[in-house]
Image: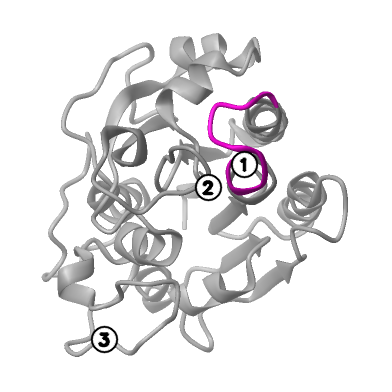
Amino acid sequence: MDKKVILISIDGMRADGLKACGNDYVKELEKICSYTYNGSSVNPSITFPCHFSMTHSVSPQRHGILTNTYVPQVRPVKGIFQKVCEVGGVCAMYYGWEPLRDITLPGDLKYASYINSYADESTDTLLTDEAEKRIKESKPDFVFLYMVETDDKGGHDNGWMSEEYLRRISIAIDNVKRMVENFGDEYSVIVMADHGGHDRSHGTTMPEDMTVPFFFYGPDFEKGKVLDGVSLLEIAPTIAKIMGIIPEREWDGKPVF
Protein backbone atom coordinates (compact mmCIF):
# COMPACT_ATOMS: atom_id res chain seq x y z
CA MET A 1 0.00 0.00 0.00
CA ASP A 2 1.69 3.20 -1.21
CA LYS A 3 -0.12 5.78 0.92
CA LYS A 4 -0.13 5.43 4.69
CA VAL A 5 -2.01 7.36 7.40
CA ILE A 6 -1.49 8.29 11.04
CA LEU A 7 -4.71 9.34 12.80
CA ILE A 8 -4.20 11.20 16.09
CA SER A 9 -7.20 11.79 18.35
CA ILE A 10 -6.73 14.15 21.31
CA ASP A 11 -9.63 13.45 23.65
CA GLY A 12 -11.68 16.41 24.84
CA MET A 13 -9.60 19.06 23.05
CA ARG A 14 -11.73 22.14 22.53
CA ALA A 15 -10.85 24.32 19.55
CA ASP A 16 -10.40 27.39 21.73
CA GLY A 17 -8.35 25.30 24.15
CA LEU A 18 -5.96 24.40 21.35
CA LYS A 19 -5.60 28.07 20.42
CA ALA A 20 -4.99 29.01 24.06
CA CYS A 21 -2.55 26.25 25.03
CA GLY A 22 0.52 28.36 24.19
CA ASN A 23 2.32 25.74 22.10
CA ASP A 24 4.13 27.39 19.17
CA TYR A 25 3.62 24.34 16.98
CA VAL A 26 -0.10 25.12 16.66
CA LYS A 27 0.77 28.02 14.34
CA GLU A 28 3.01 25.71 12.34
CA LEU A 29 0.14 23.27 11.91
CA GLU A 30 -1.98 26.10 10.52
CA LYS A 31 0.73 26.74 7.90
CA ILE A 32 1.31 23.15 6.79
CA CYS A 33 -2.20 21.67 7.04
CA SER A 34 -5.70 22.12 5.76
CA TYR A 35 -7.62 22.79 8.97
CA THR A 36 -10.62 24.10 10.84
CA TYR A 37 -11.32 25.30 14.35
CA ASN A 38 -15.04 24.97 13.72
CA GLY A 39 -15.46 21.23 13.23
CA SER A 40 -18.37 19.27 14.66
CA SER A 41 -18.59 16.41 17.12
CA VAL A 42 -21.66 14.14 17.29
CA ASN A 43 -24.53 13.91 19.76
CA PRO A 44 -24.01 12.61 22.37
CA SER A 45 -20.56 14.19 22.59
CA ILE A 46 -19.15 11.29 24.62
CA THR A 47 -15.84 9.55 23.96
CA PHE A 48 -16.91 6.09 22.82
CA PRO A 49 -19.86 7.12 20.61
CA CYS A 50 -17.65 9.84 19.09
CA HIS A 51 -14.84 7.44 18.22
CA PHE A 52 -17.21 4.84 16.83
CA SER A 53 -18.72 7.53 14.59
CA MET A 54 -15.25 8.73 13.62
CA THR A 55 -14.09 5.27 12.53
CA HIS A 56 -17.43 4.06 11.06
CA SER A 57 -18.80 7.29 9.51
CA VAL A 58 -22.31 6.94 10.91
CA SER A 59 -24.06 8.84 13.70
CA PRO A 60 -24.61 7.39 17.18
CA GLN A 61 -28.28 7.12 16.31
CA ARG A 62 -27.31 4.71 13.51
CA HIS A 63 -24.61 2.66 15.24
CA GLY A 64 -26.62 2.59 18.47
CA ILE A 65 -23.82 3.35 20.96
CA LEU A 66 -24.96 6.24 23.14
CA THR A 67 -22.74 5.80 26.22
CA ASN A 68 -19.17 4.74 26.96
CA THR A 69 -20.29 1.10 27.06
CA TYR A 70 -20.02 -0.87 23.83
CA VAL A 71 -23.13 -2.56 22.46
CA PRO A 72 -23.22 -4.51 19.16
CA GLN A 73 -24.58 -2.62 16.19
CA VAL A 74 -28.13 -3.56 15.22
CA ARG A 75 -27.15 -3.24 11.57
CA PRO A 76 -23.37 -3.62 11.43
CA VAL A 77 -21.38 -1.11 9.37
CA LYS A 78 -17.71 -1.79 8.60
CA GLY A 79 -15.22 0.71 9.96
CA ILE A 80 -11.95 2.01 8.61
CA PHE A 81 -9.89 -0.68 10.39
CA GLN A 82 -11.86 -3.44 8.65
CA LYS A 83 -11.59 -1.67 5.28
CA VAL A 84 -7.81 -1.36 5.57
CA CYS A 85 -7.51 -5.05 6.49
CA GLU A 86 -9.72 -6.10 3.57
CA VAL A 87 -7.17 -4.75 1.09
CA GLY A 88 -4.23 -6.34 2.90
CA GLY A 89 -3.19 -3.33 4.95
CA VAL A 90 -1.64 -3.51 8.41
CA CYS A 91 -3.23 -1.59 11.32
CA ALA A 92 -1.75 -0.46 14.63
CA MET A 93 -3.39 1.23 17.61
CA TYR A 94 -1.95 2.97 20.69
CA TYR A 95 -4.45 4.07 23.32
CA GLY A 96 -4.76 5.19 26.93
CA TRP A 97 -8.40 4.29 27.64
CA GLU A 98 -9.12 0.56 27.59
CA PRO A 99 -12.75 0.52 26.34
CA LEU A 100 -11.61 2.14 23.09
CA ARG A 101 -10.34 -1.26 21.91
CA ASP A 102 -13.93 -2.05 20.88
CA ILE A 103 -13.83 0.34 17.93
CA THR A 104 -11.93 -2.54 16.28
CA LEU A 105 -12.84 -6.18 15.72
CA PRO A 106 -10.68 -9.18 16.64
CA GLY A 107 -8.07 -9.57 13.95
CA ASP A 108 -8.07 -5.92 12.86
CA LEU A 109 -4.85 -5.03 14.68
CA LYS A 110 -1.41 -6.46 14.03
CA TYR A 111 0.17 -4.12 16.56
CA ALA A 112 -1.44 -2.55 19.64
CA SER A 113 -0.51 -1.12 23.01
CA TYR A 114 -2.64 0.06 25.92
CA ILE A 115 -1.32 2.00 28.91
CA ASN A 116 -3.71 3.17 31.62
CA SER A 117 -3.77 6.95 31.55
CA TYR A 118 -3.01 7.19 35.28
CA ALA A 119 -0.04 4.82 35.12
CA ASP A 120 2.46 7.62 34.55
CA GLU A 121 2.77 11.41 34.52
CA SER A 122 2.29 11.35 30.75
CA THR A 123 1.16 8.05 29.32
CA ASP A 124 0.24 9.97 26.16
CA THR A 125 3.95 10.54 25.63
CA LEU A 126 4.78 6.91 26.41
CA LEU A 127 2.22 5.75 23.87
CA THR A 128 3.69 8.13 21.32
CA ASP A 129 7.10 6.59 22.06
CA GLU A 130 5.70 3.13 21.34
CA ALA A 131 3.95 4.24 18.15
CA GLU A 132 7.14 5.94 16.98
CA LYS A 133 9.21 2.81 17.61
CA ARG A 134 6.74 0.57 15.78
CA ILE A 135 6.48 2.86 12.77
CA LYS A 136 10.27 2.97 12.46
CA GLU A 137 10.51 -0.82 12.69
CA SER A 138 7.44 -2.04 10.78
CA LYS A 139 5.84 0.80 8.77
CA PRO A 140 2.18 -0.21 9.40
CA ASP A 141 -0.24 1.20 6.86
CA PHE A 142 -2.72 2.74 9.30
CA VAL A 143 -1.70 3.92 12.76
CA PHE A 144 -4.20 5.22 15.31
CA LEU A 145 -2.72 7.16 18.24
CA TYR A 146 -5.22 8.14 20.92
CA MET A 147 -4.28 10.58 23.68
CA VAL A 148 -6.65 10.84 26.65
CA GLU A 149 -4.94 12.95 29.31
CA THR A 150 -6.42 16.19 27.98
CA ASP A 151 -9.81 14.72 28.88
CA ASP A 152 -9.24 12.90 32.17
CA LYS A 153 -6.31 14.61 33.92
CA GLY A 154 -7.11 17.93 32.25
CA GLY A 155 -10.85 18.41 31.83
CA HIS A 156 -12.46 15.99 34.27
CA ASP A 157 -9.93 16.39 37.08
CA ASN A 158 -9.30 20.13 36.79
CA GLY A 159 -11.92 21.65 34.47
CA TRP A 160 -12.01 22.52 30.80
CA MET A 161 -9.89 25.60 30.04
CA SER A 162 -8.07 25.29 33.38
CA GLU A 163 -4.31 25.77 33.48
CA GLU A 164 -3.76 22.02 33.79
CA TYR A 165 -6.11 21.31 30.89
CA LEU A 166 -4.19 23.68 28.64
CA ARG A 167 -0.88 22.16 29.79
CA ARG A 168 -2.11 18.70 28.81
CA ILE A 169 -3.09 19.98 25.36
CA SER A 170 0.41 21.40 24.92
CA ILE A 171 1.95 18.03 25.82
CA ALA A 172 -0.28 16.36 23.24
CA ILE A 173 0.79 18.88 20.59
CA ASP A 174 4.45 18.16 21.38
CA ASN A 175 3.66 14.53 20.60
CA VAL A 176 1.91 15.56 17.38
CA LYS A 177 4.98 17.57 16.37
CA ARG A 178 7.19 14.53 16.83
CA MET A 179 4.96 12.35 14.67
CA VAL A 180 4.68 14.91 11.85
CA GLU A 181 8.37 15.77 11.82
CA ASN A 182 9.52 12.14 12.00
CA PHE A 183 7.01 10.56 9.62
CA GLY A 184 5.40 13.32 7.58
CA ASP A 185 7.41 12.35 4.50
CA GLU A 186 5.95 8.83 4.54
CA TYR A 187 2.53 9.30 6.13
CA SER A 188 -0.41 11.65 5.87
CA VAL A 189 -1.31 12.80 9.38
CA ILE A 190 -4.76 13.72 10.68
CA VAL A 191 -5.00 15.47 14.05
CA MET A 192 -8.40 15.95 15.66
CA ALA A 193 -10.53 15.86 18.78
CA ASP A 194 -13.61 13.79 19.49
CA HIS A 195 -15.46 16.37 21.60
CA GLY A 196 -14.85 19.41 23.77
CA GLY A 197 -16.11 20.03 27.28
CA HIS A 198 -17.34 22.54 29.86
CA ASP A 199 -16.79 22.88 33.59
CA ARG A 200 -15.69 19.29 34.40
CA SER A 201 -17.98 17.42 32.03
CA HIS A 202 -19.16 16.96 28.42
CA GLY A 203 -21.82 15.11 26.46
CA THR A 204 -24.27 17.90 25.68
CA THR A 205 -24.99 19.83 22.49
CA MET A 206 -23.44 22.99 23.95
CA PRO A 207 -20.94 24.63 21.56
CA GLU A 208 -18.21 24.07 24.16
CA ASP A 209 -18.82 20.31 23.88
CA MET A 210 -19.53 20.10 20.15
CA THR A 211 -16.89 22.36 18.55
CA VAL A 212 -13.61 20.62 17.76
CA PRO A 213 -10.51 21.23 15.60
CA PHE A 214 -9.30 19.15 12.63
CA PHE A 215 -5.90 19.30 10.91
CA PHE A 216 -5.02 17.37 7.73
CA TYR A 217 -1.37 17.08 6.69
CA GLY A 218 -0.06 15.42 3.54
CA PRO A 219 0.23 15.77 -0.24
CA ASP A 220 -3.55 15.60 -0.75
CA PHE A 221 -4.17 18.69 1.41
CA GLU A 222 -3.59 22.32 0.54
CA LYS A 223 -1.34 24.03 3.05
CA GLY A 224 -2.98 26.80 5.06
CA LYS A 225 -6.47 26.11 3.70
CA VAL A 226 -9.34 26.73 6.12
CA LEU A 227 -12.02 24.04 5.77
CA ASP A 228 -15.77 24.24 6.30
CA GLY A 229 -18.35 21.62 7.21
CA VAL A 230 -16.02 19.04 8.72
CA SER A 231 -17.40 16.58 11.27
CA LEU A 232 -16.32 13.30 12.80
CA LEU A 233 -18.15 11.50 10.00
CA GLU A 234 -15.64 12.75 7.42
CA ILE A 235 -12.63 11.01 9.01
CA ALA A 236 -13.08 7.42 7.79
CA PRO A 237 -13.96 8.46 4.19
CA THR A 238 -10.98 10.82 4.10
CA ILE A 239 -8.60 8.08 5.26
CA ALA A 240 -10.07 5.69 2.70
CA LYS A 241 -9.55 8.17 -0.12
CA ILE A 242 -5.95 8.88 0.90
CA MET A 243 -5.20 5.15 0.92
CA GLY A 244 -7.09 4.36 -2.28
CA ILE A 245 -9.72 2.22 -0.53
CA ILE A 246 -13.31 2.01 -1.75
CA PRO A 247 -15.48 3.52 1.02
CA GLU A 248 -18.20 1.52 2.71
CA ARG A 249 -21.51 2.09 0.95
CA GLU A 250 -23.34 2.90 4.17
CA TRP A 251 -20.93 5.58 5.37
CA ASP A 252 -22.57 8.98 5.72
CA GLY A 253 -19.50 11.22 5.56
CA LYS A 254 -17.54 12.46 2.55
CA PRO A 255 -13.78 13.02 2.11
CA VAL A 256 -12.59 16.53 2.91
CA PHE A 257 -10.63 16.73 -0.39
The amino acid marked with disc number 2 is: Asp
Distance from the alpha carbon under mark 1 to that under mark 3: 29 Å
Residue at the farthest front position:
199
Which one is in front, 106 or 152?
152
Residue 39, picture quadrant: top left
* Residue depicted at x 22% and y 63%: 246
Mark linked to residue 150: 1
Verify CB contact (< 8 Å) between mark 2 and mark 1.
yes
| Residue to which mark 3 is pinned | 73
Mark 1 vs 3, N-terminal side: 3
Mark linked to residue 138: none
The amino acid marked with disc number 1 is: Thr
What is the x, y in percent for residue 75?
17, 87
Label 3: how many residues lie within 10 Å, few (<14), some (14-19) or many (20+)? few
Label 2: how many residues lie within 10 Å, few (<14), some (14-19) or many (20+)? many
Residue 143 against residue 3 in the figure, above or below: below
**What range of the chain is rendered magenta?**
155-163
* Residue depicted at x 43% and y 41%: 197
Residue 186 against residue 129 in the figure, above or below: above
